[in-house]
Amino acid sequence: MAQAAAASDPESAGQRIFLSPPHMSGNELRLVEEAFASNYVAPVGPMVDALEREFAERTGVAGATAVASGTAALHLVLRLLGVGAGDEVWTSTLTFIGGVSPICQLGAAPVFFDVSPATWTIDPALLADEMAKAARFGRLPKAVVPTDLYGQSCDIDTILAICEPYRIPVVTDSAEALGATYRGRPVGSAGAAAIFSLNGNKIITASGGGIIVSRDRRLTDQARFLAQQARDPAPHYEHTTLGYNYRLSNVCAAIARGQLAVLDDRVAARRAIFTRYQAGLGDLPGIAFMPEAAYGRCTRWLTVMLVDPQEFGADREVLRLALEAANIEARPVWKPMHLQPVFAQARHVGGAVSESCFEKGLCLPSGSALAQSGQGRVIDIVRGGLASAKRVG
C-alpha cells in the first residue's frame, strides 16, 4: 500500500520539485483552440485585445498593452518617457537584471538604491535624501523604477510623494507582483505606468510575455504602436520612427487569459504555501522569512527564507545543496545589481541590507500546485540540515 501511495504522489516519490513551475487551470487549451480556429496565430488578434482589456480591468487602469516580455515592456515605457543617453534612472539594487538592462540599452545610467529591511523594496528614506541632493546639484533622474519584489509592493504612495514635486515619473517594475495589493489597491494602478511579466515561472504565465498598464491611455497606445514596428496608418508600410517587433502572439494571449481568470486562486495557494513553511520552519534557530509590509498584501510569489549561519549552524548554500541533492530546486535571493560585474562602475546608494538578503536568503519551492507531501520533503530536509549542523558542532 505504501508503494502504491508513493507512486500516485510524484513529489513524495523523489521526483524533482521545481522552484515555481507553471500551473495550468484547464481553461487555457479551450482558449488556444479558439485562437487556432480563428486562424489568428500571429502577434495580433482578438485574444490579445481581450487580454489587454482584462488586464486593464484587473489593475484598475485605463489601458494595457501586451508585449513579448516584461523587459520589452519596460524598454518601451522608458523610451516613451524620453530616457536616453546621459540620463540617470534610479532603481532598486535588489532586483532581476531584466528590470535594469533596458535602462542601459537606451544609453542611460542606472543608479542602484538599497532596500528597506521591513519590505525588501526600495528604501524611501534613501530615495528622498538622494533626491534632495540631486535637486541641489541639478542632477535629477529621468525616471524612478522601484521593484515590487517577490510579490510585495513597494511603498508606492511615499515614492510618488517624493518624486512628484520634481515631476519625476515613476514606473513600477511589478513583474513579480501581479495580484498583490497596496493599501487595498491593485499593484500597478499608480504612477506613470507599471509592467508585469508572464514568464514561465511567474504566478501566472503565457509561457512568456509582458504587460504594460497605465492610467494614461495615450502611453499604452503609443507603446502598442512602437511594439508593432511603428507602422504608420497607410495601405503600404510607412514608417516615420523606428519601432520593435515586441507584440505578444494571439496564441500566448489565449494562455494568459486562461491563467488570469484564476489569479486569485493562485495567490491564495502561494500564501498558503508560505504559511505552511512558516509553521514548519519558523521555530528553528536562525530561520526567518521575508517580512510582509504593513501597507499591503504580498502574493508570496516565492517564499524566501533567511538563514543566519551563526544561529542555525549552516549557511543558506549548505541548505541549497542539500535540497539539490534531494532533487529539489531552491535558489539564492537576487544578487544585488551593484555587486554584478557588469555594473561595477555604476553608482549605488547604500547596499548593506540587500547584501545581507543575498547572503542569507534562499527561495524555496513555491509553485501553486505544490502538494503538501512535496512541501513536507522540503521542510524535512531543512530541519535535517539543522540536525546535521548540531552533530558537526
Image (tube, grey):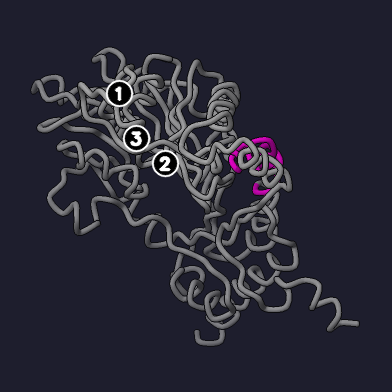
Amino acid type of disc 3?
Leu
Quadrant position of residue 185: top right
Amino acid type of disc 2?
Ala
Do callouts 1 and 3 mark residues in contact (Cβ within 8 Å)? no
Q: CA distance from mark 1 to mark 3?
A: 29 Å
Amino acid type of disc 1?
His
Which SS type dominates the magenta stretch? helix
| Within-10-Å neighbours for mark 3: few <14, some 14–19, many 20+ | many
Residue toward you, 15 or 24: 24
How many tags in the picture? 3
Residue toward you, 96 or 309: 96
Reading the chain from its start, which is encountered first: label 1 or label 3? 3
- Taking 386 as reference, is 165 above or below it? above
| Within-10-Å neighbours for mark 1: few <14, some 14–19, many 20+ | few
Return the mark for residue 236. Answer: 1
Residue toward you, 6 or 280: 6
Left or right of 308? Residue 235 is left
Question: Do we see residue 182 in this rendering?
Answer: no
The quarter of the picture where the N terminus appears is bottom right
Do callouts 1 and 2 mark residues in contact (Cβ within 8 Å)? no
Residue 81 placement (x, y as % from top left): 26, 22
Return the mark for residue 178. Answer: none
Quadrant position of residue 283: bottom right
Q: Which residue is mark 2?
A: 68
- Foreground label between 1 and 2: 1
Q: Residue furthest right?
A: 1
**Magenta stretch bounds:** 254-270
- Taking 288 as reference, is 193 above or below it? above
Residue 156 placement (x, y as % from top left): 43, 26
As for residue 39 lying within the magenta part, the answer is no
